[in-house]
Amino acid sequence: MKELLSGVVVRTGGASYIVECEDGRLVRCRTVSGTESDNVGTSLVAVGDRVTFRPKSSATEMPEGVIDHVERRKSALCRRRDLRRNRSKEQEQVIAGNIDQLVVVSSAFDPPLNRRLVDRYLAFAESEHLPVLLVVNKTDLAEPELLEKELETYRKLGCRICSVSAARRTGLDELRELLRDRVSAFSGHSGVGKSTLINLLVGRRELKTARISWKTGKGVHTTSSATMLRLPEGGYVIDTPGIREFNLSGITRENLRFYFTEFLRYMPDCNFSSCTHTVEPGCAVVKAAGNGQIDPERYESYLALLETLDE
Ligand SMILES: Nc1nc2c(ncn2[C@@H]2O[C@H](COP(=O)(O)OP(=O)(O)O)[C@@H](O)[C@H]2O)c(=O)[nH]1
Ligand SMILES: [Mg+2]
Ligand SMILES: [Zn+2]
């Protein structure tokens, strides 16, 4: 019997999984009934998983193997449950596992910086205990002073921010430094330049980029399954679907207030300990948003997000 090898799943497709070994070699693996996992009630194998596999003799160009064991995931980005399908199969579906940080990609212009969406990502990351890196692309299209003013709130929040222009190739060295040796899940509105950036970072044209405007939405390549790409400096980037595809069930009407972290210091001064910072009299958060101690835009995002959550 051949020895066990180990690697990381970089792509899933049909019934097979592409596993990348330490030396960069790719092996097409499948699972068998004897495949063991340290994870329960969840996808057996997902992009980002560390696995051991037994090589098999292969007739195809790509070596083949059988997955013996899937290691415990330290984090998982899960897909929203589609209630119309899989009603009986109540298990979470993992988009990507073992993520070190969520990279929220936005653009300074065309499409304009969408603060509601950024705030939604920040709340999600907070609820999942995922560190965030906010990347602002297309700075070539923006007025630097205006952009800086828009980002001020996020700097004050302690959010790591990296302003780049894929078109002008600026800010990329700093971004590479922030991605080095980590597994980073890229996500953001379509058209902001995720694929363009990832192609630059990996040094190959791996991902399709949009030819047609984000405004029409036509012909835009949407990422339905995750692909993990190795960075020359070490680490991986994963192109993931947008937040609409994410499972946000960790966020509720009750706990959302804790994920807008700048609200926390005002909360003890609210009249009611269970204050939702909406209609209650004597709300310290509403007061702070009124006098600018809390950015009113952030407070608006909180209200907008709260609206979308079920009772
Ligand atoms: N002006 C400008 N355009 C960019 C930049 N980065 C990407 N684009 C363009 O924005 C469009 C969408 O890019 P794409 O990578 O497909 O976005 P994705 O949907 O987030 O993957 C394409 O037409 C790109 O050429 C940039 O830094 N500046
Ligand atoms: Mg794309
Ligand atoms: Zn309150």
Image (tube, rainbow, N blue to C red):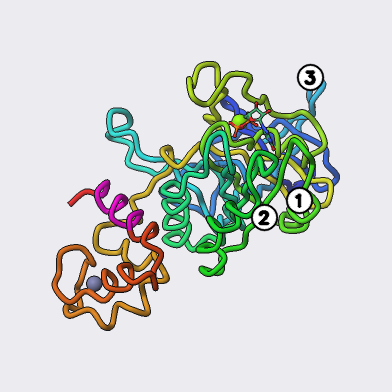
Residue at the spot 64% in from the left edge and 51% down from the top edge: 184
Residue at the spot 63% in from the left edge and 43% down from the top edge: 142
Q: Position of residue 241 (x, y in %)?
A: 52, 36
Q: Quadrant of ligand 3?
A: bottom left
Q: Position of residue 47 (x, y in %)?
A: 60, 41
Vertically, is 247 above or below 281?
above
Number of numbered discs: 3
- Residue that mark 1 sits on: 171
Residue nearest the viewer, comparing 84 with 219: 219
Vertically, is 300 above or below 277?
above
Q: Residues within 10 Å of mark 3 (few under 14, many from 20)?
A: few
Q: Which mark is residue 73?
A: none
First of labels 2, 1 by sequence position: 2
Q: Which mark is residue 60?
A: 3
| Tag 2 and tag 1, C-beta contact below 8 Å | yes
Q: Which mark is residue 162?
A: 2
Q: Position of residue 4 (x, y in %)?
A: 75, 47
Give the quarter of the image for residue 34: top right
Vertically, is 178 above or below 6?
below
Q: Secondary structure at mark 1?
A: loop
First of labels 2, 3 by sequence position: 3
Residue 25 left/right relative to 247: right
Residue 295 left/right relative to 63: left
Q: Residues within 10 Å of mark 1 (few under 14, many from 20)?
A: some
First of labels 1, 3 by sequence position: 3
Amino acid type of the residue tagged 2 in the rendering: Cys
Q: Which residues are magenta?
A: 300-309
Amino acid type of the residue tagged 3 in the rendering: Thr
Calculate the distance from the C-alpha at mark 2 to the C-alpha at mark 1: 7 Å
Calculate the distance from the C-alpha at mark 1 to the C-alpha at mark 3: 42 Å
